[in-house]
Image (cartoon, rainbow, N blue to C red):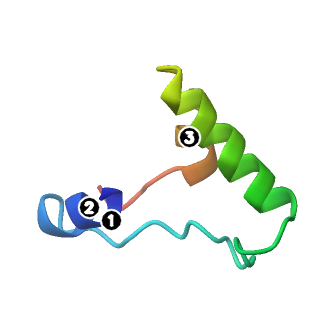
Amino acid sequence: MADSVLDRVYNAKPIDWTGGHDLQRMNERRAAYIAALKAADRDDIGPLIKFVGPRDDL
């Protein structure tokens, strides 16, 4: 959904969720992604924003 909003609303590039890692396999990137999603489920989007990183193209 985020990628669709970035593309259609902001005409911006999609987020590089994988950061060069395979999110199908357990690794530090996947663990950080899952932790960020769980925090967002608790209404704390800070970790997800940090995971995504700065967006200079908005």
User: Is residue 16 rendered to the left or right of residue 1?
Assistant: right
| C-alpha span from label 1 to label 3 | 14 Å
Disc 1 marks which residue? 3
Disc 2 marks which residue? 6
**Residue at (46%, 66%) from the top-left corner?**
15
User: Is residue 44 rendered to the left or right of residue 8?
Assistant: right
Q: Secondary structure under badge 1?
A: helix
Q: For the residue marked with disc 2, what is the amino acid?
A: Leu
Query: Quadrant of residue 9 in the image?
Result: bottom left
Question: Within 10 angstroms of label 2, few (less than 14), some, or many (20 or more) residues?
Answer: some
Quadrant into which the N terminus falls = bottom left
Q: Are marks 2 and 1 in contact (CB under 8 Å)?
A: yes
Residue 17, position as x, y percentages in the image: 57, 66
Q: Which mark is residue 48?
A: 3
**Residue at (34%, 73%) from the top-left corner?**
13
Q: For the residue marked with disc 3, what is the amino acid?
A: Leu
Q: For the residue marked with disc 1, what is the amino acid?
A: Asp
User: Is residue 25 rendered to the left or right of residue 43?
Assistant: right
| C-alpha span from label 2 to label 3 | 15 Å
